[in-house]
Amino acid sequence: MSHAQDITAGLLPLPQQIRSAKHESGPTARGATRVQWTNEQDPLVQAYLERAFGTLDCGEILITVDQVAIDSLPQADMLEGYELELSPQQIHLKADSTWGALHGLTTLKQLIYENTLPRQVHIVDQPRFPWRGLMLDVTRHFIPLPQLLEVVDGLQLLKLNVLHLHLSDDQGFRFGSEAFPKLVSDEHYAKDELRHLVAYAADRGIRVIPEIDVPGHVNHWLLAYPEWGSEQAKPSQRFGVHPGCLDPTQESVYQALETLFAEVAEVFPDRFVHVGGDEVNPKWWQRAEHIQAFIAEHDLKDARGLQNYFLCRLQISLAALNKQIIGWDEVLHEQMPDCLVQNWRGATTRDRALAVPRPCIVSAPYYLDLHFPADIHYRFDPTATQQDWLRMEDDLATDLRLEHIAEALSWTHQWRRGAIALDDSEPGAPVLGGEACQWAELVDGPTLPMRLWSRLPAVAERLWSNANCRDVTDFYRRLAGVLGHPELCSDGHQHTCLQQLGLTDQQIQAVQYLEPTKWYSRLLGAQALQARMQGSEMPQARPYTVATPLNKVVDYLMPESFASRGLKDAVIGEHLDELALLCEGAVAEPWPTGDDDVVEGLKANLAAIRLYQQTLAGATALDEALAGLRTHYRPYGEYMPALIPFLLDHLQTRR
Ligand code: ACM
């Protein structure tokens, strides 16, 4: 495709308006970069210009920034719109604020193709939602600081503006508290490191929001400070919800939290602090006589009421620090304090929050740890009606790629009970936007890039671009463009990781046609998955703990096989001969021990290719081939033979 036809090839999220793109005109030589400022020079914009464009000749760039951010930080209500006009003579970037101008330069960067900029294009752009984030769990596995800085660079390229760090959980505590050193895990961020991260992100228009998850998810805390709980916590390396929770009847707990959050507030300047609140197991509270007496004395009714009492106390402490709190869905309560709600349990809890009314950040359809393909995240709009959202959720059970876990998807139906319908005449609080969630039970530093960048762009576009930007084919076309940027490209890194596992180049190519199994099937393992499908849970049967190394082929795979998707539009016949040879060769070579399923997955792809070829040659009937392909398409341990759905698609079109 020529450059002239392809102005949008690297544009993701798609800008709101692309006006007067002269598609017939190709690139133009622009000469050495000369920056002119209409108003005062903007140091952050100037610094980004130097970083992003280096030695590229951009010609004359005229920049107009109305409000230059000097000593001010990105905020929840910052202005982010910009206008970018390229003509053969000049580039003109106009923005109300530094933050918009930074986005304008990102767009300019995404317009570079084969080291040149287009001749003529006029873009007028602004985000659909003010809150566009990534929640990164840095607790289940630690992500070193230099890598967090790289994550920030990737967020900037996707015009995301919030990095929410999940800093504490049952398995660890990553905030380098000086007041409570016993809480702090060996691998943690010192306060100065976090200050550096905050400043680095702010220079890129990104807010960093800390989450300290209380009163549940605190097993690690209670090992250090047993006096903060009502029972003895046990050392544990397992994943899954732990029973331990803070004892909300104790004044010393509130005093400790006040001190801790004062430290947090001093490091993170954003107005918002996340206090967790999810998955509080009420068992300890129900078993303690003094807690039951407290509930009765304060007329709190039950554990929910007690959690709300706890949240109200916390909100008062944080308001005194000039902070507003965010909590996960479970903070919803008739008497809840002023609070943003981060939605993770679906449309019904979103609408309950909006009806309270509490503003919402939608995350439920954006869980990247489920290993879903990008198109699934892409289709969920944060403001979809409850009815449409639930229908889309139900449709997932009929998606071939999720067939192996379809039964488990109804696990979320527990949250549909007691759903309320929003009254159209009283729309309630606003949806502020959303955050993709990267939980890290099965992700660590080396595996993060493959997990993150393959699907995060889908969420970024959903949150920035116009609601009617829904063409998934076009999304994947532009995704290929944007994944070419060094900030998001994980090809070289993945190759190195797989090489270190002992794979040959041929094997590395062949495993591009495999995917990890979906939903929580890896994390739960076969036994616990079965139990959850039947509505219960057996955490003791889970295969992974914090001590399990993430060093199998499956850990380094893309959650979605772009290689298989790429075959869709190619001349498939020729490619399949090559691919069959590749798989045969790869299978025949020695593999790292203890990971036999990977070979079984490749053999399934190979068997499917053979069936496909026999069908084209007229040696196998179409219906028989389709049935055969479906039989081969199943989990092999933690691997899915991802080529097969695409072969099925191709064959089905021949019907
Ligand atoms: C959550 O996924 N427990 C917020």
Image: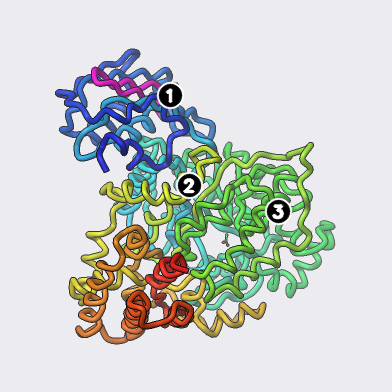
- In the image shown, does 452 or 277 lie closer to the viewer? 452
For badge 3, the amino acid type reads Gln
Ligand 1 neighbours mark 2 (CB distance < 8 Å) = no
For badge 2, the amino acid type reads Asp
**Mark 3 or 1, nearer chain start:** 1
The residue shown at (65%, 44%) is 339
Please report contact status of discs 1 and 2: CB closer than 8 Å, yes or no: no
User: Quadrant location of residue 569?
Assistant: bottom left
The residue shown at (28%, 47%) is 485
**Mark 1 or 2, nearer chain start:** 1
Q: Residue 471 has which mark?
A: 2
Separation (CA) of disc 3 from disc 1: 38 Å
Q: Position of residue 349 (x, y in %)?
A: 69, 55
Residue receiving disc 3:
387
For badge 1, the amino acid type reads Ser
Residue receiving disc 1:
97
- In the image shown, does 611 or 33 lie closer to the viewer? 611
Q: Position of residue 34 (x, y in %)?
A: 20, 20
Q: Position of residue 306 (x, y in %)?
A: 74, 59
Mark 3 or 2: the one toward you: 2
Span shown in magenta? 83-98
Q: Residue 353 has which mark?
A: none
- In the image shown, does 518 or 332 lie closer to the viewer? 518
Q: Residue furthest top?
A: 38
Separation (CA) of disc 1 from disc 2: 31 Å
Q: Is residue 587 above or below residue 555?
A: below
User: Quadrant location of residue 442?
Assistant: bottom left
Majority SS type along the magenta span: strand
